[in-house]
Amino acid sequence: MNKKSEKIESILSEKRVKLHNFLPSNRKIWTIVGKEKEHWLDPDIGFCSCSGYYFSKMSDNKKECYHLESIRLAEKEKKTELIKFSDDEFGDFLKGLISDL
């Protein structure tokens, strides 16, 4: 198993893929809890807030980071933790998420 596969397996086995669902608007924010910080992702547009995402997008290989692969695999294997919030909590959640960046 290569290093990337090991990282993905660790994320999935430790249940670090989170889908934050805000109700009643049904807004969704994906995160992966990392070793040092939480990363925000949008798999629909292929975005991740990790530094690997930026470096890979700026390089010639243009490969996606392992966080995005982790989300797709977590969805497929139903290893996503769903966390429900009220829409009233959306602003504070975003502030906390941005402060981690």
Image (tube, rainbow, N blue to C red):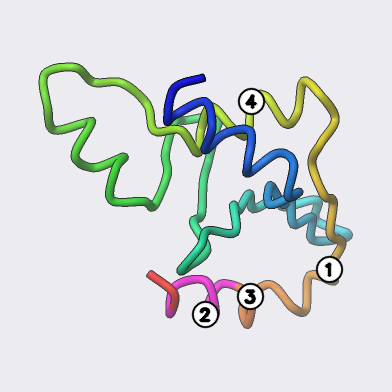
Cβ–Cβ under 8 Å for marks 3 and 2: yes
Please tell me which residue is depicted at 76% across the width and 48% down the height of the picture.
15
Residue at the spot 63% in from the left edge and 44% down from the top edge: 11
* Spatial CA span between label 1 and label 4: 22 Å
Which quadrant holds residue 85? bottom right
> Principal SS element in the magenta part?
helix
Which residue bears the numbered disc 3? 93
How crowded pointer 4 is (Cα within 10 Å; few <14, some 14-19, many 20+) is rated as: some
In space, the residues marked 4 and 2 are separated at their CA atoms by 26 Å
Give the extent of the magenta segment: 94-99
Residue of label 4 = 72
Between disc 4 and disc 2, the foreground one is: 4
Q: Earlier in the sequence, mark 2 or mark 1?
A: 1
Q: Which residue is mark 1?
A: 85
- Residue type, numbered disc 4: Arg
Instruction: Using the image, tell me which numbered label, if any, was put on residue 95.
Output: 2
Task: Provide residue 90's location: percent of width, then percent of height.
Answer: 68, 72
Earlier-in-chain disc, 4 versus 2 = 4
Q: Where's residue 10, x and y in %? A: 63, 42
Horizontal side of residue 13 vs 23, given as left or right: left
